[in-house]
Image (cartoon, helix red, strand yellow):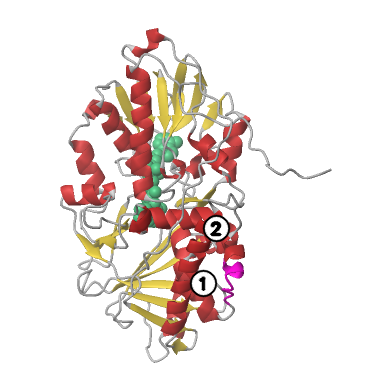
Amino acid sequence: MSLPSVRRVLLAFTCLPLVFARSVKRADTGNARVLILGGGVAGVIAARTLHKQGITNFTIVEARGELGGRLQTETFGAPGNEWNIERGANWVQGTQTDDGPENPIWYLVQKHGLKTQYNDWYGSVSTYDDTGPVDYLDVFNDSSDEYTTLTVVAGARVPKKQVDLTARAGYWLIDAKPRTPAEMACEYYQFDWEYAQTPEESSWIASSWGNNYTYDTDVGGFSETNQMSIDQRGFKYFIQAEAAEFLLPSQVMYDATVQNITYSSDGVEVALLDGTTLSADYVLCTFSLGVLQNDDVVFNPPLPDWKQEAIQSMVMATYTKIFLQFPQNFWFDTQMAIYADRTRGAYPVWQSLDITDFFPGSGIVFVTVTGDFSVHVEALSDGEVQSEVLGVMRAMFPNVTVPDPLAFYFPRWHSDPLFRGSYSNWPASFFSGHHENLRATVEERLWFAGEATSQKYFGFLHGAYFEGLDVATTLAECINGGGCAGLRHVPEITNAYPYVV
Ligand SMILES: Cc1cc2nc3c(=O)[nH]c(=O)nc-3n(C[C@H](O)[C@H](O)[C@H](O)COP(=O)(O)OP(=O)(O)OC[C@H]3O[C@@H](n4cnc5c(N)ncnc54)[C@H](O)[C@@H]3O)c2cc1C
C-alpha cells in the first residue's frame, strides 16, 4: 500500500500588516562581512548561495567539529560487527516523480553518490501487542485512510479561512476515534512518528500541509517515496561533499560555540565561548528553534517581543531512535513493525536493519519514540531504558528467550544544548503571522533561517535547504543591491474575532 495521492491542502497566505526593515546605508554594502551561525544544511546552503552571488567575505561559525548539524553518524556495534548508523536524519522524504519538482536533498544525494535504499513504511509491516504477534493490519490500513481524510478535510478549511484546530479535534470531527491499543499504535505510526508530537499537540492544518507539500504530487510534492541512507560514510556525506566544492578552509570556524550576539542597525558582534569576539555587518543565524528557545545563546538587546512570541510559540519536538544489536536476528522479517502497548507512545515503531538491502548480518534493530516519551527516556539511565526496551521485546516475542544486547545506544537530542530537540512542530495556536515573524529580520542585520523557518517544509532536511537558499538569496540581493528591505515582520498577531469583555 502506498500513501494515497489525494491529500491536498492549500497554503493560506494571510493578508497581514507587514513592517519592512529600513534600508541599509550604502557605505555598508561594499565588502559586507557576513557570519553564518551554524553549519547544518541551512548554513551550508546559505554559504553556497552567498558564494554563487559573489559574496565571499563570510564565515560559518560552528560549535561542532564538522558540518552537517542534525546529520550525525555513530559507529555502533560489538567489535568486528560495527556499523555506521544515523543518530539524526535518516531519510530523504519525497524524491521526485517523473519530471515534477525534485527534492533538493535527493538531488544532492544522487550528485554525491550516496547509497540509499527504498524503505517500505506501508507495505512491509508486522504487528504486535503485549501478548505477542497479533495481526491488526486491517486496523493499520483503516488508520492510513483516516490520516488521508484528516489531511483532505484540513485542506477544505483553508479557502474558507476557517481557523486551525488541533489534529486531535480533526480526527474526532472525521469520526476517527482510536480507543484500543492497536488503534492508538496505528494512529501513532501515521501521525506522531512523523511530527514527533501527538495530534493533541499539533496543528491540524499545518501538519496536513507539511505532509502534502512533501509527498503529494497533486499539490507540488516530490513523491511518496522514502529513501533511507545506508551509506557507511554517513548521511552527512552529501552536505559535506557539497561544501567541499566551494568552501575555503578560511571560511569556516569549527569548535566555535557562540555565547552572545550583540546587534544594532549598524552591525553585529558575536562572542564565542573561548573569549573571541567576531564582528560583522550581517549575521545569519541558523541555530535550531530549541537553541533559540532555551537562551543557550544570549541576544543583546533581547530580541523584540514579536520575535520572542514567534520563537516561544512553535515547538521543538524530539524524535529518538534507540538501537540494539544482538548476536542474531530473532524478530520480524518485514522492514517495519508496530507494537501496541497499553500506554500510547511506549516503544511503538520498530525497524529491522538486519534485512536484505539494509545491513544484513548486522543483528541491529531499532525502536523509535517521540515527544514526551523521548523526554521520559532521556531522563533515565541507559541501563533503565535498556530494561524497558527488553521488557517490551520479551512481550513481543514470548516464544523467544531474548538475550541481553551486545550493544545499546540512543542519542539525547532534547538535552543537547546545540539542538534542544530534533525538529520543530507547529501547534494549533501558532499562526501564519507568527511564522512570518520567526524568519523575519531584526534591526536589518540579524537574519534567521533553518528548518523551523520553512512554512511548507518545517521539520525536514529540504525545509532547511530551501530556507538556507531563500533567506541567503534575499540577503545577497540586499548586500549587492546597496540597500536592504530585510524580511518583513508583523508587529502584533491579532484575533480577527476578539474576546468580548
Ligand atoms: C533524530 C532526527 C531524525 C530526523 N529525521 C529526518 C529525516 O529522516 N528526514 C528529514 O528530512 N529530516 C529529518 N530530521 C530533521 C533534519 O535533520 C533537520 O530538519 C535539519 O537537519 C535541520 O538543519 P538546520 O540547518 O536547520 O539546523 P541544524 O542542523 O541544527 O544546524 C544548526 C547548527 O548550529 C550549530 N549550533 C547550535 N548552537 C550553536 C552555538 N551556540 N554556537 C555555534 N554553533 C551552534 C549546531 O551544531 C548545528 O550544526 C531529523 C532530525 C533528527 C534530530
Quarter of the image with the C terminus in it: top right
Picture mark count: 2
| In the image: residue 58, left or right of residue 132 | left
Above or below residue 50? Residue 44 is below
1 vs 15, nearest the viewer: 15
In terms of image quadrants, where is residue 219?
Answer: bottom left
Residue 271 seen from this side? yes
173 falls in the magenta region: yes
247 vs 85, nearest the viewer: 247
Q: What's drawn in magenta, residue-wise?
A: 171-178
Residue at (43, 58) in percent of width and height:
8
Residue under numbered circle 2 = 204
- Residue 346: which numbered mark, if any? 1
Residue 386 is situated, as x and y percent measured from the top left of the image, at: 44, 71
Q: Choose mark 1 or mark 2, whichever is in front.
A: 2
- Residue 104: which numbered mark, if any? none
SS class of the residue under badge 1?
loop
Residue 277 seen from this side? no
| In the image: residue 297, left or right of residue 75 | right
Earlier in the chain: of badge 1 and badge 2, it is 2
Principal secondary structure, stretch drawn in magenta: loop
Furthest residue toward right: 501
